[in-house]
Image (spheres, rainbow, N blue to C red):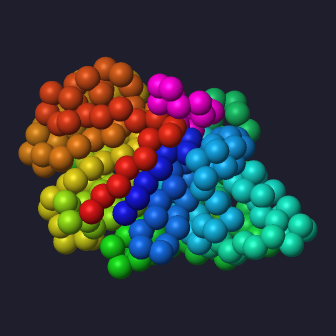
């Protein structure tokens, strides 16, 4: 499996790419190409083009959850595909994969929409849409983990904002938050968006779904920007036990959390332009 960071809060030193508070990762497993999240704006298009990655050949566009810093870049992808059709260029019609709640309207702190502003109906005009709360295997080794079971008390945080459902408005527990996991010869590679469900709960679900305890790497947002002491200690204890070979925390992971995690694991630098290969 190969992975490239297209969008993150920072770019690697001496790599002249664009960065923003958002996330988008490009994966290849065998002959299957996957885009995990789309960032906030159109910078994933410019970064991918500069890296020689053809986003028109991506089969699956997977969303970790519905927040704007992971979904608003879909506008740019739709424009890219629309122009390709108009210009007669080759493209693959993508399949959009997400939890059923990922496209519901969300609000917080007086902001009218912090979720994806594209509806499922609109996406259907641009490709296939597959919504599932259950795990879904994309390849023989790569799986969409579905709705995450929240297993650890120390990861429980109060709901932030509201979500607008067909049954009315409710507190937003971000139940659509999910991740990918890939089986490799070295163990699992787990790819996260923001880990609102809890980074430890995500890793546990990946180990359970894949039937593999070894963790080769976890890359993505850990949602540890300003964690409470008990949450940080719980995460620290968990990774001390799991002993991942490497961690690549980025996006919504604060510097203090990275420093703390480095006491129990090999924490490595992450940013736009990073390219990793496993197995």
Which residue is painted at 17% across and 36% down in the image?
Answer: 265
Q: Nearer the viewer, residue 11 or 206?
A: 11
Instruction: Give residue 49's position: percent from left, percent from top.
Output: 67, 49
Looking at the picture, does residue 177 appear above or below residue 224?
A: below
Is 136 placed left or right of 106 in the picture? left
Instruction: Give residue 116's position: percent from left, percent from top.
Output: 67, 51
Residue 248 appears in the rendering: yes
Which residue is painted at 52% across and 64% down in the image?
Answer: 34
Instruction: Give residue 204's position: percent from left, percent from top.
Output: 23, 57
Which residue is painted at 26% across and 34% down in the image?
Answer: 267
Q: Nearer the viewer, residue 58 or 238?
A: 58
Residue, far top: 256
Residue 114 appears in the rendering: no
Which residue is painted at 55% across and 45% down in the image?
Answer: 6
Looking at the picture, does residue 93 appear above or below residue 116?
A: below
Instruction: Give residue 279's position: percent from left, percent from top.
Output: 27, 63
Residues rendered magenta in the picture = 8-23
Instruction: Indicate yes or no whether the magenta region holds residue 119.
Output: no
Q: Which image quadrant is residue 187 in?
A: bottom left
Instruction: Indicate yes or no whether the magenta region holds residue 15.
Output: yes
Q: Main secondary structure of the magenta part?
A: loop
Residue, far left: 241
Q: Work out which quarter of the rendered image holds the N terminus and state it.
A: bottom left
């Amino acid at each position: 499996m190969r992975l490239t960071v297209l969008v993150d809060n920072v770019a690697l030193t001496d790599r002249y790419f664009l960065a923003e508070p958002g996330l988008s990762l490009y994966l290849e497993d065998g002959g299957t190409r996957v885009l995990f999240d789309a960032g906030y704006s159109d910078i994933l298009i410019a970064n991918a083009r500069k890296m020689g990655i053809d986003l028109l050949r991506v089969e699956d566009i997977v969303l970790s959850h519905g927040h704007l810093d992971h979904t608003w870049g879909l506008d740019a992808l739709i424009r890219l595909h629309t122009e390709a059709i108009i210009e007669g260029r080759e493209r693959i019609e993508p399949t959009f994969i997400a939890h059923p709640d990922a496209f519901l309207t969300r609000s917080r702190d007086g902001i009218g929409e912090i979720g994806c502003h594209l509806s499922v109906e609109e996406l259907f005009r641009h490709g296939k849409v597959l919504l599932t709360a259950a795990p879904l295997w994309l390849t023989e080794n790569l799986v969409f983990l579905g709705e995450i079971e929240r297993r650890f008390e120390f990861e429980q945080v109060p709901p932030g904002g509201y979500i607008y459902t067909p049954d009315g408005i409710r507190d937003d527990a971000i139940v659509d938050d999910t991740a990918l996991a890939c089986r490799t010869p070295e163990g699992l590679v787990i790819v996260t968006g923001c880990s609102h469900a809890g980074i430890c709960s995500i890793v546990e679900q990946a180990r359970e779904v894949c039937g593999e305890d070894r963790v080769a790497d976890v890359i993505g947002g850990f949602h540890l920007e300003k964690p409470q002491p008990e949450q940080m200690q719980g995460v620290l204890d968990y990774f001390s036990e799991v002993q991942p070979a490497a961690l690549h925390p980025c996006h919504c992971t604060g510097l203090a959390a990275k420093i703390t995690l480095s006491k129990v694991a090999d924490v490595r630098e992450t940013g736009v332009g990073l390219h990793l290969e496993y197995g």
